[in-house]
Amino acid sequence: MKDSVIWVAHDPSVTAATSECMLLDNAYIQAVRTFHESLPGYQPTALIPLKHLAQHLNIGALFVKDESTRFGLNAFKVLGGSYAIARFLARSLNIEDKALTFDQLNSCIQRKRIQPVTFYTATDGNHGRGVAWAARMFNQNAIVFMPQGSSRARLNAIRAEGARACIVDMNYDDAVRYAYDQSKADPQGVLIQDTSWLGYETIPTHIMQGYGTMIAEACDQFEAQEQSQPTHVFVQAGVGSLAGSVQGFLLNRYAQHSPMVTVVEAKAADCLRQSIEQGKPVAVQGMHDTIMAGLACGEASMIPWKILTSATRCFASVLDPIAAYGMRVLAAPLSGDLPITSGESGAVGVGLLVSIMTNPELASMRSYLNLNAASKVLCISTEGDTDPQSYRHIVWDGMYPSR
Ligand SMILES: Cc1ncc(COP(=O)(O)O)c(C=O)c1O
């Protein structure tokens, strides 16, 4: 079990909102929420209290944001792709209005009859499905590339949204470069990628802002149910855009009372933890063999990296059994708590939290994080059973046992 979790304490010299954080302040995120609320089928996802599990773990409260119902797509990711696509289309149509809505944008697209754009992207599944869905909502096209080893179920879910999608013979990071090249070769092509690098910043910033809807909803719900804010947040990371968005939003909302954030990665692709340890961005090469497909990214995104390195105090990378453990704990709750269907990348935060609170080998992490009876913890289940067969192998058949 000890080797299942590797963590580093990070002491940012100044824990302050960087200019990147300011892109996630309340005013921006309020406009993003207005956009998402205008989309057909919008409903805030549930924040589920796990009161009995919190008591069992000797913490004050535990809440899980359940993203499995987001727009019927089984994951939070569509929040990013849809907002970035809307902002791109709005700019092409010279719409300056900050409080963009779905109807306003769609009627303008129909009136002006723009030539359809083809949105390109690379994905482990959820982001590509969100891009395909948003492209369809705005009558545009999408072409999606998935890395080697991607699941057929996730590929088919993207195709079901009307996108052209295929699995390419490369890892995630190379698939991103491939999607970029393909988009450049197409005069109508635009890359909607959820990772940033020097010179490719606007769209990934909009994607991070799109995730703001989720964390803003979660904080509102937390405060309404608990009459106080979270003290700790566990957030999982692939390239780090979600984690950067969450950390940046929390810093803006709670300033010096910002919760302690733990970023959780898959050990096979723990580019953020390694980068923090080495003090500079590090790429993890290879095929990133993990059940946490959404976290199988070997190169950190530049914008969230700047936020996380300036503010986040704990980075953990974990082996697959920790994610599988979280899936089972959420699927078969203590009496009185609700069950949550959480996929491999979705459940890892809960898997880590339960391990920290129950495993003596992780006592030093527990004490560093100051997790105790006064702690009020927020975890984010970022996906449901996006690969149902794999979900059942793990939850029903007990694959990836933890002990
Ligand atoms: C379910 C799920 N959770 C978390 C993440 C991590 O997000 P990011 O790549 O922004 O770090 C992903 C990424 O695809 C995902 O699909």
Image: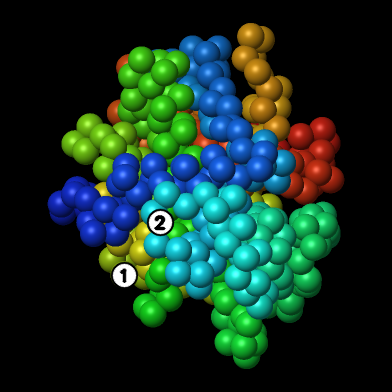
User: Mark 2 or mark 1: which comes first in sequence?
Assistant: 2
In this orientation, does residue 41 appear?
A: yes
In the rendered view, tell whether residue 71 sits above or below residue 317.
above
* Front residue of 359 and 235: 235
What distance separates the C-alpha of mark 2 from that of mark 1?
38 Å
Residue at coordinates 64% horizontally, 87% vertically from top-left? 186
Residue at position x 21%, y 38% from top?
255
Where residue 280 is drawn, which disc sits there? 1
Q: Does 45 appear above or below 244?
A: above
268 or 123, which is in the foreground?
123
Label 2: which secondary element: loop
Say which of 251 and 117 sits in front.
Answer: 117
State the image coordinates of residue 212 (x, y, percent, origin top left). 43, 45
Q: Quadrant of residue 1?
A: top right
Residue 47: x %, y % from top left: 54, 26
The image position of residue 175, as x and y in percent, is 63, 76
Q: Position of residue 111 (x, y in %)?
A: 62, 65
Name the one closer to the observer, 123 or 54: 123
Tell me, for residue 97, which label it has, or none: 2
State which quadrant residue 171 falls in. bottom right
Q: Residue at x 41, y 27 (%)?
A: 220
CB contact under 8 Å: marks 2 and 1 = no
Q: Is mark 2 within 8 Å of ligand 1?
A: no
276 in relation to 191, above or below:
above
Q: Quadrant of residue 156?
A: bottom right
Q: Is residue 337 left or right of residue 315?
A: right
Crowding around mark 1 (Cα neighbors within 10 Å: few <14, some 14 to 19, many 20+) is: few
Check disc 1 and give the amino acid type. Answer: Lys
Outermost residue toward the bottom in this view: 185
